[in-house]
Image (spheres, rainbow, N blue to C red):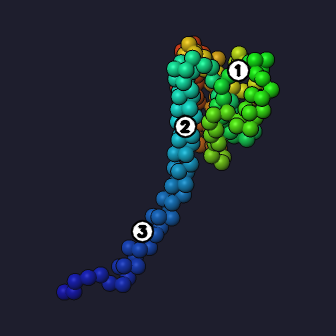
Amino acid sequence: MKNGFTLIELIVVLTVLLMGMVLVYPSFGRMSQSVELKGAAKKISSILRYYRSEAVQKGKAYQVVFDVDTREIRVQPAEAEENKGEGEKNEEKTSGGKERYLLPEGIQVKEMKIPASQYPSEYPVIEFYPNGGSNGGSFVIERENLKAYRIQVNFLTGVVEIKEG
């Protein structure tokens, strides 16, 4: 009696393992895209929560600006245009706000339901006020062929929630 495996047995086992890997590998790509989408939803909601907290702590209103065309989300202090001096306008254009977040490739912001803001803006904005409130609103971030996440901001309390679908 010999101890060990024959060459045919090794080839059969390797073939079965290879076939299993070929079947499982495509699901890893979808899984990583799903994780990336969920991560983007959490990042956006954390930005919203942070600037709600900043508005309360510093007694200053903030705008979270959604540029859907470039998939960019940026934060800037909310100020009425008539209160800004010319130097402040130019400074804001070069600095572009406090924080910027670019959504990963393939992730889109859709179904934006955001009411008019208190301060003028050419893009949709969610504003957070010193009293903890907000102008509120909701939007969906999605990637094609994957589930989507709806992010909602309560207008009265400024509380941010993420919901699947």
Q: Nearer the viewer, mark 1 or mark 2?
A: 1
Q: Is residue 34 visible?
A: no
Q: Alpha-carbon distance for marks 3 and 2?
A: 38 Å
36 relative to 11, above or below: above
Q: Alpha-carbon distance for marks 1 and 3?
A: 62 Å
Q: Earlier in the sequence, mark 1 or mark 3?
A: 3
For the residue marked with disc 2, what is the amino acid? Answer: Lys
Q: Earlier in the sequence, mark 1 or mark 2?
A: 2
Q: Alpha-carbon distance for marks 1 and 2?
A: 25 Å
Any mark on residue 17, and which? 3
Image coords of residue 159 (percent x, y)? 53, 20
Name the quadrant containing residue 7: bottom left
For the residue marked with disc 1, what is the amino acid? Answer: Glu
From the viewer's perspective, is 109 left or right of 1? right
The residue positioned 47% from the left and 64% from the top of the image is 21
In this orientation, which residue lies closer to the viewer: 94 or 104? 94
From the viewer's perspective, is 92 left or right of 30? right
The residue positioned 51% from the left and 55% from the top of the image is 28
Q: Is residue 62 visible?
A: yes
Identify residue for label 2.
Answer: 43
Residue neighbourhood size for the residue with mark 3, other residues' Cα within 10 Å, grouped as few (<14), some (14–19), many (≥20):
few
The residue positioned 57% from the left and 17% from the top of the image is 59
The residue positioned 78% from the left and 23% from the top of the image is 85
Q: Nearer the viewer, mark 3 or mark 2?
A: 2
Any mark on residue 79, and which? 1
133 relative to 18, above or below: above
Specify the quadrant that holds the C terminus.
top right
Specify the quadrant that holds the N terminus.
bottom left
